[in-house]
């Protein structure tokens, strides 16, 4: 295969951190190439250099044999390099066509653009109506907007960052079919994902980074997922183990919870009911945008409900705010790390203080106890192996996975009786995901009631005792997780709450 992009000795250093250290690899035309590594390994910095968002300190690149050094993303796009980011950059109040036009240098007239969108979407099996409002689209359809926006540029290299994190298994298969078709037409794809089984199914080659360096390359189809994970972390991967224990009495109970979404493009909650016992993990699955954020807000106290809609050990708490719920050991960790779970420009010590002041006694008589706050932040960093120079570093300086470990660890170490987490391992590597899942299992084994809201079906099957699907703000009755297949869960997430229908479809 002819190299399309050749990366030779790229290096990037930030204060106190070597993000990339003489990284070299190449991508061939028509190849699906995986970029693997644990959180903080340097993947994001590397693709940002390829896409022109970051300037390398050393090394060089060639594209089609010609020197390639994009000063900005516009130059990368002009050279035929496109990127679909993990976080969508779309305006809810605009149509599909209007959003795509905003991302083009010289968009054609809207009618002509709509025709091109329809043609490309049909060619690559990504059906999408150009006139629809983005706010009305599912997460999978929003991803199609981002992909089609890239495909209209006729890219020769397409970079994809965690593309299946918001998709059901059925939607992921549609995406894989599209990527295979693109590769067959000669487009090279640089694919970043922590889902190692999909790497094995989709990718032709893999380059593995560790601590900013290339440590291995391989054909992922010839490796097991465990072998790939061990190549990433350099040690044997620990599998989460559930301690032998029995569930106790009902701790958290939700009765007929209905709440309008504060977001005009959000999803209102509709008559949600469930209960969680001491020592139990309830898994709630759903495609992004089906009420997950609204449910966490109702359980954390950010959104007030009628007093009796949420109960702790039989006592109504639905009208209590977040601080009052923390006092009675009801804690939560939201999906959005920067801006919701953590203040980006505050230090880790300050972020620890924000949610742990009540439970950990980090304030007394109107004064903040900074040494105690720093000690608690250091405890979180050490216990959850958060890779950072120290608790004085700002939250935004951490990689996404390391910040996620800090956020989850901060709540777990406060000894909650109820912990509600949304996307606990989103964007983290296999080793970090295993550690977080083990922490949640340990918490349940110690008697806590744990609610895990997640789009990672493997995660829900691995750690939850019961599973319920959230679809359009409605929650299906929880079912024992044991015996449920990925296909059944995927269909339930898509709205097939009647399991007879789900079984028939499977």
Image (cartoon, helix red, strand yellow):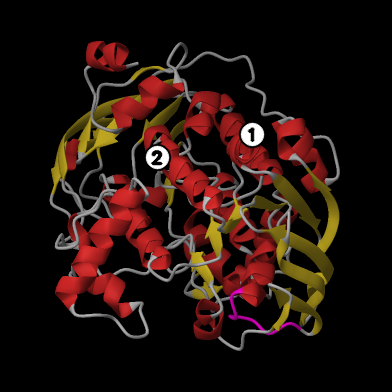
Question: Is 229 left, or right, of 165 in this rendering?
Answer: right
In the rendered view, would you say 388 is above or below 301? below
> Looking at the image, which is closer to me, 354 or 372?
354
**Callout 1 environment at 10 Å: few (<14), some (14 to 19), or many (20+)?**
some
Q: Position of residue 447 (x, y in %)?
A: 52, 27
Question: Is 178 left, or right, of 230 in this rendering?
Answer: left
Residue under label 2: 174
Region in magenta = 51-56
In the image, which disc is placed on residue 438?
1
Q: Is residue 159 visible?
A: yes
Q: Secondary structure at mark 1?
A: helix
> Looking at the image, which is closer to me, 312 or 66?
66
Which residue corresponds to the image point at 61% horizontal and 89% vertical from the top-left?
Answer: 71
Which residue corresponds to the image point at 54% horizontal and 67% vertical from the top-left?
Answer: 351
Report which quarter residue 455 is drawn in: top left
Magenta stretch, overall SS: loop
Magenta span contains residue 55: yes
What is the total number of numbered labels drawn onto the structure image? 2
Q: Position of residue 366 (x, y in %)?
A: 47, 74
> Looking at the image, which is closer to me, 410 or 345?
345
Magenta span contains residue 411: no
Q: Secondary structure at mark 2?
A: helix
Q: Position of residue 337 (x, y in %)?
A: 49, 61
Which residue corresponds to the image point at 27% horizontal and 27% vertical from the top-left?
Answer: 274
> Looking at the image, which is closer to me, 440 or 301?
440
Question: Is 343 left, or right, of 286 in this rendering?
Answer: right
Select label 2 or label 1 by which is in front: 2
């Amino acid at each position: 295969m002819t190299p399309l992009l050749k990366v030779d000795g790229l290096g990037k250093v930030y204060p106190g951190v070597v993000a990339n250290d003489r990284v070299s690899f190449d991508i061939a035309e028509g190849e699906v190439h995986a970029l693997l590594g644990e959180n903080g390994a340097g993947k994001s910095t590397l693709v940002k250099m390829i896409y022109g968002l970051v300037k390398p300190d050393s090394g060089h690149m060639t594209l089609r044999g010609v020197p390639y050094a994009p000063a900005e993303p516009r130059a990368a796009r002009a050279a035929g390099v496109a990127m679909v980011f993990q976080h969508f950059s779309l305006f809810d109040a605009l149509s599909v066509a209007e959003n795509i036009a905003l991302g083009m240098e010289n968009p054609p007239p809207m009618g002509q653009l709509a025709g091109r969108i329809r043609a490309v979407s049909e060619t690559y099996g990504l059906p999408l109506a150009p006139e629809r409002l983005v706010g009305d689209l599912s997460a999978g359809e929003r991803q199609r907007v981002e992909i089609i926006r890239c495909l209209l540029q006729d890219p020769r290299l397409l970079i994809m960052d965690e593309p299946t994190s918001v998709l059901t298994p059925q939607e992921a298969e549609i995406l894989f079919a599209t990527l295979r078709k693109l590769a067959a037409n000669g487009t090279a794809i640089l694919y970043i994902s922590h889902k190692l089984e999909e790497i094995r199914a989709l990718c032709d080659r893999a380059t593995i980074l560790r601590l900013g360096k290339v440590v291995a390359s391989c054909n992922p189809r010839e490796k097991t997922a465990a072998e790939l994970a061990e190549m990433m972390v350099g040690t044997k991967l620990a599998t989460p183990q559930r301690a032998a224990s029995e569930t106790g009495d009902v701790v958290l109970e939700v009765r007929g919870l209905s709440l309008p979404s504060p977001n005009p493009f959000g999803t209102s909650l509709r008559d949600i009911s469930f209960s969680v016992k001491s020592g139990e993990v309830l898994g709630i699955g759903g495609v992004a945008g089906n009420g997950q954020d609204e449910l966490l807000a109702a359980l954390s106290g950010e959104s007030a409900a009628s007093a009796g809609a949420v109960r702790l050990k039989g006592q109504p708490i639905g009208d209590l705010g977040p601080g009052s719920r923390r006092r009675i050991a009801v804690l939560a960790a939201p999906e959005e790390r920067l801006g919701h779970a953590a203040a980006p420009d505050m230090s880790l010590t300050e972020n620890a203080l924000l949610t742990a002041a009540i439970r950990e006694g980090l304030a007394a008589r109107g004064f903040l106890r900074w040494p105690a706050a720093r000690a608690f932040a250091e405890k979180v960093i050490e216990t959850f192996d958060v890779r950072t120079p120290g608790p004085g570093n700002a939250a935004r300086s951490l990689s996404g996975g390391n910040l996620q470990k800090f956020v989850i660890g901060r709540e777990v170490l406060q000894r909650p009786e109820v912990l509600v987490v949304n996307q606990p391992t989103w964007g983290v590597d296999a080793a970090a995901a295993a550690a977080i899942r083990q922490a949640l299992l340990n918490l349940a084994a110690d008697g806590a009631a744990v609610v895990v809201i997640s789009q990672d079906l493997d995660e829900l099957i691995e750690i939850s005792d019961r599973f319920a699907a959230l679809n359009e703000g409605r929650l299906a009755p929880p079912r024992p997780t044991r015996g449920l297949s990925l296909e059944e869960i995927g269909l339930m997430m898509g709205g097939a709450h009647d399991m007879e229908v789900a079984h028939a479809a499977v």
